[in-house]
Image (tube, rainbow, N blue to C red):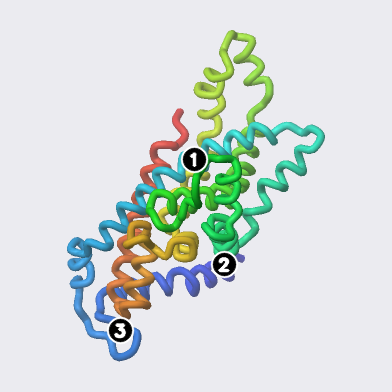
Amino acid sequence: MISPALLLVAVFFLAPLCLTVWMSLHTWPLLGSPEWTGLDNYLAIPGDRTFRNALDYTVLYTVIITPLLLVTGLGLAYLVRDRRRGVGLFRTVWFLPYVFGFASAAYLFLWLFDSSVGFVDRVLVDLHLSDAPVQWMNAADSATTAVLAMVVWKVVGFQMLLLMAGLQSIPDEVNEAALMDGSGRWSTLLRITLPLLRRHIALVLVFSVSGSMLAFEQFYIMTGGGPGNETLTVVQWIYNSSFANFQLGYGSALSVLLLALLMAINGVQLYLLRERD
């Protein structure tokens, strides 16, 4: 019964993974015959300054966006967990951006933050919060801010639903008993609600960290890695190495390294958030 699923996994995951590992051991041009080089591609990674800078920026982006999504998603989950009038519309409004593709959302926000025709600069100037258009994509900090706004708008609805399901699985009697025993709302949140949400939080963090470390479309479209490669992510550099510099073997080695890094990070997360007796 599971053989069709195993076949799909073998064809679309295991086979490409094995091919990527094999390619990483070669000098593999886009055109021409590959040549065996062993571990040379991996040994070249520590000396790749662009990769180190891209990794540093990707980790910084992940450290910022992960708690931002978690806190915002949890706050929205609290607002929509109870059934009352209009809450269904509110859930739909927040979840709807998630069904859009990252490319569509990136182009939308690229227009919103455009200094000449965008809506954001016009509002800031009209409210006297800025004397002139900000030129968001001309500096790394402002470009990152624009990308963060887009990602939160697009992804937070999905995290809201996951955390809402967790909140709804907690019996009301638990919170009521805590309040009757004199526990405040913050104490109840920290000592009862969050521990009971451990599994849902672990799932949200795995999705968030993995998606952030693999960030590509939003930066490729909105910033292009600029200015001066200051917003270049790891996946962007893998793409550039493979298809702009025609070094498919080296790009494959970077991909294998990123996969190992993600497996280690997710393993640590799941270990720290595991259920304890």
Q: Report x, y in % for residue 256.
A: 33, 65
Residue beneath the point at 31% across and 76% down: 22
Residue situated in front as seen by the camera: 119 or 104: 119
| Residue 263 appears in view | no
Indicate which disc residue 247 carries.
none
Q: Residue at x 38, y 65 (%)?
A: 236
So how many labels did they put on this image? 3
The residue furthest front is 131
User: Is disc 1 surrounded by few (<14), some (14 to 19) or many (20+) residues within 10 Å?
Assistant: some
Residue identified by numbered label 1: 68
Q: The N terminus is located in which quarter?
A: bottom right
In which quarter of the view is residue 200 placed? top right
Whole-angstrom CA distance, mark 3 to mark 1, is 41 Å
Image side of residue 221 versus residue 234, left or right: right
**Residue shown at 68% from the left, 52% from the top:** 96
Query: Of 175 and 220, which appears nearest the observer?
Result: 220
Find numbered disc 1 in the image and state the secondary structure of the residue it sits on.
Answer: helix
Which one is nearer the viewer's eye here, 214 or 65? 65
- What residue is pinned by disc 2? 5
Identity, as a three-letter code, of the amino acid under mark 3: Pro
Which numbered disc flags the more N-terminal residue, 3 or 1?
3
Indicate the amino acid at tag 1.
Leu
Identity of the amino acid at label 2?
Ala
Answer above or below: position of 217 versus 145.
below
Residue 172, horizontal then vertical, whole percent: 68, 23
Query: Disc 3, disc 2: CB below 8 Å?
Result: no
Secondary structure, mark 3, is loop
Measure the alpha-carbon separation of dots 3 and 2: 33 Å
